[in-house]
């Protein structure tokens, strides 16, 4: 099971999100995510593959002493044509760079939306849709380990503590065999090591929540950190609130998370790291029966609530066995719990325990030749208690009604095994030409499916500062979980498959400037469709193609930032009917301009301007009465209406008040652009009212180091 994403199971989730009142969008997104996504992702097995995280040489942090193992392992670093070169479709940014992007509140995960190939879904959801795939089709790693879930409140905040992030590696396509079974993107997060000089920490306070970090040495060659975050808006606003437009009564949501690491350097060649992470969310609302949405979907009337939590405990052993061999072994346990209700439409009680082991062995066969071997094994034990209206909706079906769907129940205990094997051979064939050849093998013990997929990467230094690179590979992804459950789905489905190809050129310029341009193409097949006989079948396909430009300025003097431009086209096709349509997240033009100016040692100013083509929606073109006399909408062609273009300006100022204290000030959507996220329809569908994204919004935060 891929525990780093929350996969949706039913297509009506997106439709329901668009119907909610703007003040409740973050709350409702989380609620519908519980019902569909966590059922899909957490109910079924998909084991993440191991990423390239063997010990490598790293520049010491200002307050961190790097262990000898990292220095020794420098001899085993992957073969590179030169140190500035990156594979195709890989973007590397530091946690500090992403943490200062305006409009993010310091959350580095929200800053990923400003990179090429990434489509922003909404202001209240930071989860990226990458190159023609959904946000649920991405994989996330933190220090070699799976993540229970990455975003709070359906996508508004991430669970990543910003002051611990050392580096973000974003792979937007054609990634190597060491990564998970997904066809979207890969976010590989590296956290820094604890400080070793003294006990210390810091406190961060924002408008909606606060976090604290404590770290320092424990004994010789041993150190730790522990960080915790909690929202406090529920402590300030204790009474239930009523949204004037929709009539929904809701309590303030709460979220919390923690991250802990204990590093023990056994000797010069062996290091143990103990990890403990977790997150939790609680949401509750009540929808009156006479509200518009409850009239349209009576099953949503009443109380909806969610209680989500996830915890991971793991130990990672980094070892250098010889100057030619290094190994990384992780053993861990992860639990996930989901107790949720959505009116009378869904009652979910799910508990999952995942036990995993992953190993990665790196061999240096010569000065110019590295081989990486990896294996991952997951055993997932699930306890399912489901009582749902089974509408069998998918992204291929606009005519989807929840309240008229049959009710189904499932009480079951599952034990599911999932595994990956991979081989990656990287060879510097000439001083200016390097190649990567790899293979990725998947064993799915639930669907009884096996996949063997090739991966290829090429790098050519055409000129001193000019690199041409290419990537190609085949990828698979486990279907949304509910579509393969007995009673609800089809346990004989196959995985969704994708073939990805990319060609790019990177040009290094003077004074920290660089330019990267890429073209890509993705071909999908075996998307899941609803079927009246088998519940679901593999019967959909699709394409995604685009051109991307990334111009970056590193901080060498006072100015830093980047320009990202993406031109793309994404389509889906129902292979049974032959009907083709634009993909929900098709945005032909996406532009992000990020800049930071270090005015002095005290002040840094930043701005971000974002633009993208309007989101696609499926309009209501009429109404009809069903057999029970209930008024039902008649939809137009799927994703046939495009909303007005989205754009906004975010401003930020960072003030280093003293050596220990600092502030940041943000003005989000500075010119108060009224960006439309969708429409709400009256109960009889005769009129519709626009639902707007977030308007002009100030934000302030305080940080104190001790």
Image (spheres, rainbow, N blue to C red):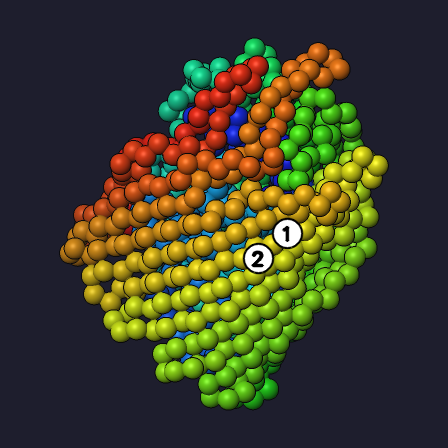
346 relative to 119, above or below: above
Snapshot quadrant of residue 551: bottom left
361 relative to 159, above or below: below
Q: In this view, does 517 lie to the left or right of 685?
A: left
Q: Nearer the viewer, mark 1 or mark 2?
A: 1
Task: Name the residue located 55 percent from the left edge and 37 percent from the top edge.
Answer: 640
In this view, the residue farthest toward the left is: 600
Q: Nearer the viewer, residue 38 or 144?
A: 38
**Sequence-wise first label, 1 or 2:** 2
x and y percent of residue 123 in the render? Answer: 42, 38
Q: In this view, does 570 lie to the left or right of 541?
A: left
x and y percent of residue 354 in the render? Answer: 68, 50
Dot 2 surroundings within 10 Å: few (below 14), some, or many (20 or more)? Answer: many
- Numbered mark located on residue 145 in the image: 2
Q: On the image, numbered disc 1 is attached to which residue?
A: 542
387 relative to 600, above or below: above
């Amino acid at each position: 099971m891929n525990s780093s994403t929350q996969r949706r199971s039913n297509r009506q989730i997106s439709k329901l999100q668009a119907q909610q009142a703007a003040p409740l969008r973050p709350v409702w997104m989380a609620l519908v995510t519980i019902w569909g996504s966590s059922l899909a992702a957490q109910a079924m097995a998909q084991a993440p593959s191991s990423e390239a995280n063997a010990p490598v040489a790293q520049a010491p942090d200002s307050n961190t002493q790097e262990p000898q193992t990292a220095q020794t392992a420098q001899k085993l670093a992957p073969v590179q044509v030169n140190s500035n070169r990156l594979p195709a479709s890989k973007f590397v940014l530091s946690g500090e760079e992403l943490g200062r992007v305006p409009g993010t509140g310091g959350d580095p995960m929200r800053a990923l939306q400003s990179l090429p190939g990434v489509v922003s879904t909404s202001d209240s959801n930071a989860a990226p849709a990458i190159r023609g795939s959904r946000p649920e089709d991405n994989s996330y790693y933190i220090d070699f380990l799976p993540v229970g879930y990455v975003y709070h409140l359906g996508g508004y905040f991430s669970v990543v503590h910003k002051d611990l992030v050392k580096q973000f590696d974003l792979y937007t396509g054609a990634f190597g065999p060491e990564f998970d079974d997904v066809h979207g993107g890969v976010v590989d997060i590296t956290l820094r090591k604890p400080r070793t000089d003294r006990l210390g920490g810091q406190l961060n306070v924002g408008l909606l929540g606060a976090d604290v970090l404590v770290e320092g040495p424990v004994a010789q060659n041993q150190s730790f950190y522990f960080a915790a975050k909690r929202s406090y808006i529920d402590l300030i606003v204790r009474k239930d609130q009523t949204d004037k437009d929709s009539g929904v009564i809701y309590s303030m949501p709460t979220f919390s998370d923690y991250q802990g690491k204990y590093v023990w350097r056994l000797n010069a060649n062996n290091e143990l790291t103990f990890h403990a992470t977790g997150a939790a969310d609680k949401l509750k609302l009540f929808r009156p029966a006479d509200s518009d949405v409850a009239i349209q979907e009576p099953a949503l009337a009443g109380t909806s609530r969610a209680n989500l939590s996830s915890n991971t405990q793991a130990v990672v052993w980094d070892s250098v066995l010889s100057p030619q061999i290094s190994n990384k072994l992780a053993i861990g346990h992860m639990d996930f719990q989901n107790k949720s209700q959505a009116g009378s439409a869904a009652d979910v009680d799910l508990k999952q325990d995942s036990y995993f082991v992953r190993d990665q062995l790196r061999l240096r066969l010569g000065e110019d030749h590295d081989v990486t071997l990896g294996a991952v094994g997951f055993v997932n034990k699930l306890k399912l208690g489901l009582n749902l209206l089974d509408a069998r909706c998918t992204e291929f079906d606009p005519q989807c009604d929840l309240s008229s769907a049959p009710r189904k129940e499932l009480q079951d205990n599952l034990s599911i095994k999932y595994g990956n094997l991979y081989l990656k051979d990287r060879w510097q064939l000439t001083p200016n030409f390097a190649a990567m050849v790899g293979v990725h093998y998947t064993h799915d013990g639930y669907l009884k499916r096996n996949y063997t997929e090739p991966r290829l990467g090429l790098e050519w230094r055409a000129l001193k500062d000019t690199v041409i690179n290419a990537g190609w590979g085949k990828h698979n992804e486990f279907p949304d979980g509910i579509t393969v459950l007995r009673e609800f789905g089809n346990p004989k489905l196959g995985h969704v498959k994708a073939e990805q190809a990319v060609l790019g050129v990177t040009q290094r310029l003077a004074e920290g400037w660089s330019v990267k341009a890429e073209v890509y193409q993705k071909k999908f097949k075996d998307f899941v469709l609803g079927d009246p006989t088998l519940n679901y079948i593999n019967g959909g396909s699709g394409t995604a193609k685009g051109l991307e430009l990334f111009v970056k300025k590193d901080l060498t003097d006072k100015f830093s930032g980047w320009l990202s431009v993406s031109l793309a086209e994404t389509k889906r096709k129902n292979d049974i009917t032959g009907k083709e349509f634009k993909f929900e997240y098709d945005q032909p033009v996406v532009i992000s301009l990020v800049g930071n100016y270090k005015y002095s040692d005290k002040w840094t100013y930043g701005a971000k301007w974002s633009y993208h083509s309007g989101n696609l929606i499926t309009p209501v073109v009429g109404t009809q009465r069903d057999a029970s006399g209930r008024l039902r909408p008649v939809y137009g062609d799927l994703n046939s209406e495009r909303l007005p273009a989205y754009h906004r300006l975010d401003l930020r100022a960072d003030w280093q008040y003293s050596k220990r204290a600092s502030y940041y000030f943000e003005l989000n959507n500075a010119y108060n652009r009224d960006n439309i996220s969708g429409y709400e329809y009256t109960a009889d569908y005769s009129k519709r009212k626009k639902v707007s994204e977030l308007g002009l919004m100030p934000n302030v935060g305080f940080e104190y180091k001790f």
